[in-house]
Image (cartoon, grey):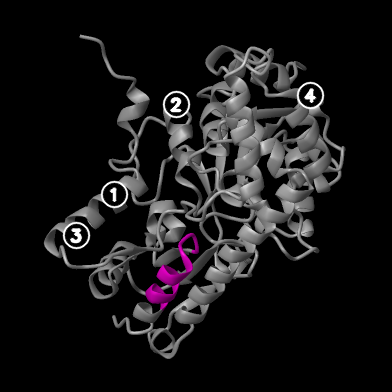
């Protein structure tokens, strides 16, 4: 019999979101009359913007003609015109189109990136953090041979991000020559790294031979002009950082699937070879490129009309987040000592329920309010006692969920 890859035996028993779905399904089966509202998984709910839809329709119709049909792209890194538009619209031309690799989403890139670094690389992750950072590391064999414990994996360095440190980690715990996973705006905490934070990060990475894997999938939600949307706003970042971006949340492409990864040409391994060359080899070997239809939508999303429409959608979700925060700041939550964190630059609200287990709070909110949330413990050891509330939902559902939450008691 063929043996299973041993790295997979070390994964946590249940991935966070399927476990949430399992508990929701069980509750619904026991209470078929309950109208459950989800403030859990970060899945967009609002329709694609008209301009994007129209351009995608035009592209699809052209595929039905000899003149307009397109098969594989010459380069799996993406349509040249889309890479050029990303360069100009997002990076003001300071990132070359050749350094931009279009993909089927930031999560997919994060999962594939570990193949370049192998099982022997040191890895440091923000704690709490998006589960793919840890699970991708474990699948690649870099998480160690011991299974997960309540404190995480032995060979992964966890960098606590808590209210006490402004949700930005103490980098002194990071080993030399590490991959450092950083997400800003952060999922799940919603915190945004300042320019000072990223300046410290870049200098640390360069001084210690580290590569920063910078997840900026929520950068379009940043409304504070003093906060950086890209790590490349920091001098020297091209020497030490790979950035992941996504159309999923700002353009509603969670199901359409489209994102990109920036790998600067002067970013190198210890032997002097270019990391971009290794990434190109991976994408050309294991990936035939993002859907041409999705890329046509992405191209439209980044023109003047598309950018305007995306900002309207982003405003909608940020307004939802403000409603959720207001509900969590109501008197009943104050009495329970709940602490609410939301800076208005992310689609998530992060709340601490002191002395409580995250999954217990999850079950209580589901039972009392028929509202699904996300337990912070699912994002890492430092997420215990926290709950993530997602603003992705129809306004009427958000409003009803908020009214229910105002009656919650523990």
Residue found at x 69% / y 58%: 311
Q: Quadrant of the C terminus?
A: bottom left
Does the magenta run of residues contain 397? yes
- Residue 22 vertical placement versus 279 (above, below): below
Specify the farthest residue to the left.
30
Q: Nearer the viewer, residue 231 or 225?
A: 225
Res 260 → quadrant:
top right
Mark 1 or 2: in front is: 1
| Lower position in the chain sequence, tag 1 or tag 4 | 1
Residue found at x 43% / y 71%: 396
Marks 2 and 4 sit apart, C-alpha to C-alpha, by: 30 Å
Q: Quickly name the residue at label 4.
A: 98
Dot 4 lies on which element?
helix
Residue found at x 39% / y 51%: 151
Q: Quickly name the residue at label 2.
A: 141
Q: Tell me, for residue 19, which label it has, or none.
A: 1
| Lower position in the chain sequence, tag 3 or tag 2 | 3
Mark 3 or 1: in front is: 3
Dot 2 lies on which element?
loop
Mark 2 Cα-neighbour bin, 10 Å: few <14, some 14–19, many ≥20: many
Mark 3 or 2: in front is: 3
* Residue 216 seen in the figure: no
Mark 4 or 3: in front is: 3
Relative image position of residue 29 (x, y in whole percent):
14, 57
Q: Quickly name the residue at label 3.
A: 28
Q: Are marks 1 and 4 in contact (CB under 8 Å)?
A: no
- Residue 90 vertical placement versus 3 (above, below): below
* Residue 151 seen in the figure: yes
Tell me where the magenta segment starts and ends, as one range.
Answer: 391-402
Q: Are marks 3 and 1 in contact (CB under 8 Å)?
A: no
Specify the farthest residue to the top.
1
């Amino acid at each position: 019999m063929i043996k299973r890859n041993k790295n997979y035996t070390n994964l946590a028993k249940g991935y966070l979101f399927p476990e949430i779905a399992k508990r929701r399904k069980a509750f619904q089966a026991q209470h078929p009359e309950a109208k459950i509202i989800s403030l859990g998984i970060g899945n967009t709910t609002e329709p694609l913007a008209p301009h994007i839809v129209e351009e995608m329709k035009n592209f699809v119709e052209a595929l039905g003609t000899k003149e307009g049909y397109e098969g594989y792209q010459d380069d799996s890194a993406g349509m040249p015109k889309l890479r050029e538009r990303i360069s100009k619209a997002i990076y003001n031309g300071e990132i070359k189109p050749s350094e931009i690799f279009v993909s089927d989403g930031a999560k997919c890139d994060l999962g594939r990136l570990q193949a370049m670094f192998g099982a022997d690389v040191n890895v440091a992750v923000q704690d709490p953090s998006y589960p793919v950072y840890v699970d991708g590391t474990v699948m690649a064999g870099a998480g160690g041979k011991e299974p997960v414990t309540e404190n995480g994996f032995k060979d992964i360095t966890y960098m606590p991000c808590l209210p006490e440190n402004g949700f930005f980690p103490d980098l002194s715990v990071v080993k030399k020559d590490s991959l450092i996973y950083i997400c800003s705006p952060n999922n799940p905490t919603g915190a945004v790294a300042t320019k000072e934070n990223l300046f410290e990060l870049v200098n640390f990475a360069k001084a210690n031979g580290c590569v920063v894997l910078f997840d900026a999938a929520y950068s379009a939600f940043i409304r504070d002009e003093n906060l950086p949307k890209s790590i490349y706003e920091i001098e020297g970042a091209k020497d030490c950082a790979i950035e992941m971006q996504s159309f999923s949340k700002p353009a509603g492409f969670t199901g359409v699937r489209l994102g990109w990864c920036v790998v600067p040409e002067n970013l190198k391994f210890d032997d002097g070879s270019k990391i971009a060359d290794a990434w190109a080899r991976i994408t050309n070997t294991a990936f035939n490129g993002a859907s041409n239809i999705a890329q046509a939508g992405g191209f439209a999303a980044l023109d003047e009309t598309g950018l305007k429409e995306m900002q309207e959608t982003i405003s909608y979700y940020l307004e939802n987040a403000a409603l959720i925060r207001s509900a969590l700041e109501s008197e009943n939550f104050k009495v329970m000592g709940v602490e609410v964190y939301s800076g208005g630059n992310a689609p998530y609200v992060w709340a601490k329920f002191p002395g409580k287990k995250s999954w217990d709070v999850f079950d209580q909110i589901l039972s009392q309010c028929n509202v699904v949330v996300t337990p912070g413990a699912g994002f890492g050891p430092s997420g215990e006692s926290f709950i993530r509330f997602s603003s992705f939902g129809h306004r009427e559902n958000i409003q009803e969920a908020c009214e229910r939450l105002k009656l919650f008691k523990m």
